[in-house]
Image (tube, rainbow, N blue to C red):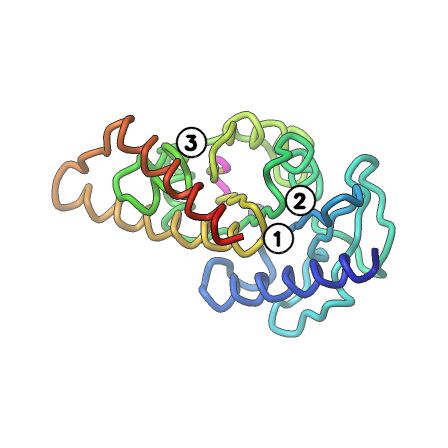
Amino acid sequence: MQDRIGEIRDQLLLAAKEMYERGLVASVWGNLSARVPDTGLIVVTPSGMDYRTLRAEDLVVVDLETGQVTEGKRKPTSELHMHLAILRARADVNGVMHTHSVYASACSAAHREIPPIVEDLAQVVGGSVSVARYALPGTPELGAAAVKALNKKGAVLLANHGVVGVGHDIMEALRVCTIVEKGAQIYVIAKMIGTPVLLSHEDVEYLRSTYKDHYGQNK
Ligand SMILES: [Zn+2]
């Protein structure tokens, strides 16, 4: 079991540093979690630590059912409730990333969902990135609101706050958060120069299912 936890720790650390490098978070904000398959455990980032100097041993192992820390000296992320709620609700999700990227956060501040206007966004999200009902950060209410608005999709906006992206693993969650931020930028710019034209529901369904099949073959 320690090997499996170690592998997930390494992946999570890599994704956390990449999230910071890509400018999806500022300073110590944002947080990540990943399921350790078949163990009932998850690995989460610690609260308020600098991503540039973060080490594998700073990550915290938490029991998914009880929410209790089982390994690690650090305090887990303040958004632990939300990570637990999403990983409990979505058996198909093994990685959850929460960022405060600028354009997606702007949409969240305007309570404007990001519609499927470009293909890569439709592929990774499977529809609009909906806005969850506002709740204070760190509360179980935020977790419940995020689960509800996320539904079966790949990403959700937290009202007046930021983004959550989910995936088969934490690297896919990173990809989702990156594509959502790019989609938000395109949406805002498209609104400045005209009226964004949405992809049809049928096309979104097709794009989503072919993306999932393709991903499955790469496993
Ligand atoms: Zn946040």
Q: Nearer the viewer, residue 61 or 53?
A: 61
Read off the residue under disc 2: 79
Disc number at residue 41? none
Q: Residue at position x 52%, y 50% from top?
A: 173
Between the residue at mark 3 and the residue at mark 2, the CA separation in whole angstroms equals: 19 Å
Q: What segment carries the magenta color?
A: 158-162
Read off the residue under disc 3: 130
Q: Can you give x and y, in whole percent of width and height, for residue 132 in the image? A: 50, 30
- The total of numbered circles placed on residues is 3
Read off the residue under disc 1: 31
Q: Residues within 10 Å of mark 1 (few under 14, many from 20)?
A: many
Tell me: is circle 1 under 8 Å from ligand 1.
yes
Tell me: is circle 2 under 8 Å from ligand 1.
yes
Which amino acid, by three-letter code, is at mark 2? Glu
Which amino acid, by three-letter code, is at mark 3? Ser
Q: Residue at position x 48%, y 39% from top?
A: 154
